[in-house]
Amino acid sequence: MSEITSEEIDAVCNLVSDLCGICWDESKSYLIEPRLGSLLEQANCENYKDFTRKVRAELVPGLKEQVIDAVTTNETLWFRDESPFEALRHKVIPELIDDKGTSMYPKRFRVWSAACSTGQEPYSIAMAFADTISDIESWDIQILGTDISPSAVEHASQGIYNELEIGRGMDSSHLMKHFVNRGKDRQVNEKIRSMCRFEQRNLHDSMAGLGPFDIIFCRNVAIYFSPEDQKKLFDSLASVLTPNGWIFVGSSESLTRQGPQWQAQQHCRSNCYRPNMEVQNA
């Protein structure tokens, strides 16, 4: 195939932005061929302008979903970075339990794992709850895992992982307690899976009808958005967070530039934030 033209690069970058909200520009042109080249050939397209046209018009069944899968980075592992889960066990969950003690629903938690990839993060959150609450079966805990990738959501819903996937961060203690054998693979057991549900969702879409959530994990995804879209994202997340809720972001991410409504917290070396009630009530 001939060298990709600037016009084709613009067409692909605009497509990626519209489908996924991911900010691609000419500096990311090196990703186009390895990520989308085989799809272009399968769709019998002469060039990437023709390819983007077919994707937008949905002329090839399933092609749009394949593009989303190819473009998004489904990089994840169990208990990723560890510190957020230590903060959950030692600070966030115990404190929220105290906060909820006099509420109408003292044993109910709602959690959102945004951009959850193939499910390791929401299942890790569920295991952190099980580590912290001894009678977990008597609690009403619902963890929503969402991702823009259809194949990632399907994988997460099944909760079945091969040896390589299990080896990425899963310790022997949690493996013994929370998994069952499925031939050469392992499946998250029913106790943990019952706390989690999964759906496909674009973080640029309206969040009406979601929440409110006590805890939101949105880690290592906003870095792919433009600064304007980052602000829109965190404003939207704030709208579905309870007044005393918590948001966890990635180790390289910060909400301080999003405005004074976010109050930074440092627990177990984890980046987490709570709404600044003084600003909200001003």
Image (cartoon, grey):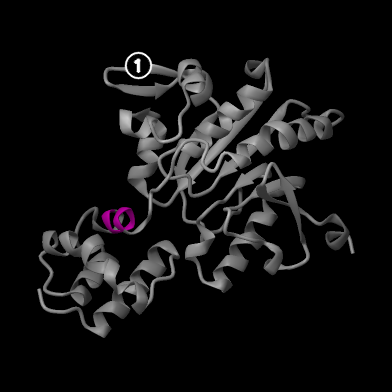
Say which quadrant the N terminus sits in.
bottom left
Which segment did they paint magenta?
A: 66-70
94 and 58: which is toward the camera: 94
Picture residue at 32% right of the left edge, 53% below the top: 69
Picture layout, residue 179 above or below residue 21: above
Picture residue at 28% right of the left edge, 78% below the top: 9
Percent position (x, y) of residue 40? 16, 64
Percent position (x, y) of residue 276? 81, 57
Say which quadrant the C terminus sits in.
bottom right
Please name the amino acid that badge 1 sits on: Asn
Picture layout, residue 135 above or below residue 268: above
The answer to which image quadrant residue 277 occupies is: bottom right
Mostly what secondary structure, the magenta segment? helix
Query: Does residue 194 appear anywhere in the picture?
Result: yes
Outermost residue on the bottom side: it is 6
User: Does the magenta portion include 200?
Assistant: no
111 and 134: which is toward the camera: 134
Per the image, the residue denoted by label 1 is 181
Percent position (x, y) of residue 228? 57, 73
Percent position (x, y) of residue 243? 78, 48
Picture residue at 41% right of the left edge, 69% below the top: 17
The answer to which image quadrant residue 185 occupies is: top left
Q: In the displayed structure, does residue 84 sit left or right of residue 202? A: right
Picture residue at 73% right of the left edge, 37% below the top: 92
